[in-house]
Image: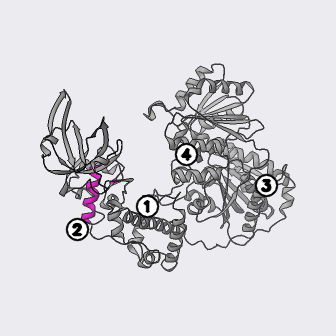
Amino acid sequence: MGTLDMAVTALPGIGPKKAAAFEKLGIRTLRDMLNTFPRRYDDRSVMKPIAMLVPGESCCIRAMVATQPRLNRVRRGMELVKFQAADDSGAVEITYFNQPYMKNNLRMGETYMFYGKADAVGRRKTMTNPICERENRAKYTGRIVPVYRTTAGVTQKNLLDAAEAALAQCEIFPDLLPPEVTDAHGLCQAEFAYRNIHFPADFLSLEIARRRLIFEELFILACALKRLHGDQTPQAGLALPQADITGFYKTLPFSPTGAQRRAIDAVLSDMSSGFAMNRLIQGDVGSGKTLVAAAAAWMTANGGHMSVMMAPTEILARQHYHTLTELLSPSGVRVGLLTGSMTAKEKREAKANLAAGEFDLLVGTHAVITPDVELPRLALVIVDEQHRFGVEQRAALAAKGKKPHVLVMSATPIPRTLALIIYGDLDVSIIDELPPGRQPVDTLLVNESYRARLNGFIRKQVEQGRQVFVVCPKVEDDEDASPGLKSAEEHAEYLQTVFSDLRVACVHGRLKAKQKDEVISRFLAGEIDILVSTTVIEVGVDVPNANLMVIENAERFGLSQLHQLRGRIGRGPYKSWCVLVSDATNNVSRERLKIMTKLSDGFAISEEDLRLRGPGDFFGNRQHGLPETHISDLGADMQVLTVAQDAAHALMASDPNLSKHPALRGAVERMIETAGGTFN
């Protein structure tokens, strides 16, 4: 018999060309095929008498061909095969379009299974192009039939046949879960699960199979996370003397919120504990995470040591430099800046000041991790928007000190349970209050019919001295063939035509970093009225004078991403608006966008995003690195995940390397490899 690692070409009817089409669905081996689970099921197990057929309803009937099938050529390119089928309750007229072979496939007087959508013409019941099988050879009728995701060159029949053949080839299914785990949680065996997830005997068997496979997938995820995050016992670190933080608070021009104070207390406690801090500060846009970083840098400087802060973009690094200088200079903490775009002379001076101990805090971009940057007395590493950096970059920065404290920050609010999965190696502090003075942003949902009124509203804001963000889902017109999808470059040209007297500019990810920074700097300086962009402005760009954001094709963005974009406005003293433009008619899309008009709290929005979409788009383009799950849903299966995590951690406490469970270890390694070696 075949093994799970055999190529799909070992299955009947799958040659090289078909295998290439299967590969588009991620199916290369029998294992891949069996882990390509149906996205839904058609219940064709219930037979209906013909008399009970309801127009518009898809159903299965067992009926005898009552009249001789006849072929009619209506016109060129149109052929009909028509006949009547009957059971004890009545008759139905069946028509096949352009399937002339059905005339000879069907024999009058024989009984067949038909599955299709019922209809009616007057009092006559009809069915068009139903699936048809002989009663004693039923494969697609009289049962619960799986429905798979398809792609060009791969039909439902191809996938159904391949799943059936793969199940027949692999009679032995390795049970990845230890017997004590399946017994403790009342789970079925792997073989039963795989057979019934693809071809369920009934819906109870399907539910039993799903429960087993969801648990197994989340168990493997928990083992992979544990393996990646390693031993989480605290590591010895520098114990900084804990100074009286009230002295720092007195130098501030505002009073910190309760959430900020709690986060700062946790950070200072970590840094004075004698163990190396490894903490995530997670807060909504504008919640004041930078103050927590400032307090940590202040304590570090008080102890005679230095800190470094790494930001993902030049603009954000400069923004932090100015903010932290304002917050820390009254306390005598010296802040320096080092970025890639500084002149050679500026870089030499910054590095010389570093070597001379002139900086207590260095703020910079990736430039701070270059080998020639020496960070004497380094005791604290701060990483902003940490999901935009790889683990290696964080490690390279931390390696410039001797087990420094590490503080990472993220403005992407995600549910706490998901944060604990993604950031399992970090302690998590959440800032869930906004500082007083932040302007609420009114969010409106409109369609294309409001374009003229929207343009008038844009002009009104600019005439009042304000600035406007316009966000588009793509860069160029030829990038995506979807009709009606706005591109930043083309939309900027359109807006410049509409507002010929205003200053319109465009920025997107394909520009060089220096070009992007130059455009955003001009917008910051008030030299641009309308900035059209892709999501490159999602994080960190702080323009207090911008009070209107228009998001085109809003249905193309995740809720959390929309919230990040909305967070770019409402940062000054002006009334602010976010206008979501969408012509989507899909009910789910409309529901998602309406949530944005009702909720302003990022954590509440993230819960909704997780419920509606799963974890795939919290950071855009799956930057969080979580592996794509096959059957579990991190939005709906959090409770199962918690149980699976406890079971996985108990197993790995006695077998950390899973050496006693080689099949499970292989599954864990495959998951880690698929995720690129890291989940954050």
Looking at the image, is mark 4 or mark 1 nearer the viewer?
4
What residue does disc 3 label? Answer: 257
Amino acid at the residue labelled 2: Met
504 to 31, vertically: above or below: above
Question: Badge 4, how many Cα within 10 Å: few under 14, some, many 20+?
Answer: many
Image point 72% across, 58% down: which residue?
307
What residue does disc 1 label? Answer: 673
Which disc is residue 558 wearing?
Answer: 4
Q: Magenta includes 398?
A: no
Give percent across and percent down for residue 436. 79, 47
Image point 60% across, 20% down: which residue?
498
What is the CA distance from the residue labelled 1 to the residue labelled 3? 42 Å
SS class, disc 2: loop
Looking at the image, is mark 2 or mark 1 nearer the viewer?
2
Q: Nearer the viewer, residue 429 or 591?
A: 591
660 to 252, vertically: above or below: below
Sooner in the amino-acid sequence: mark 3 or mark 4:
3
Question: Badge 1, how many Cα within 10 Å: few under 14, some, many 20+?
Answer: few
What is the CA distance from the residue labelled 2 to the residue labelled 4? 45 Å
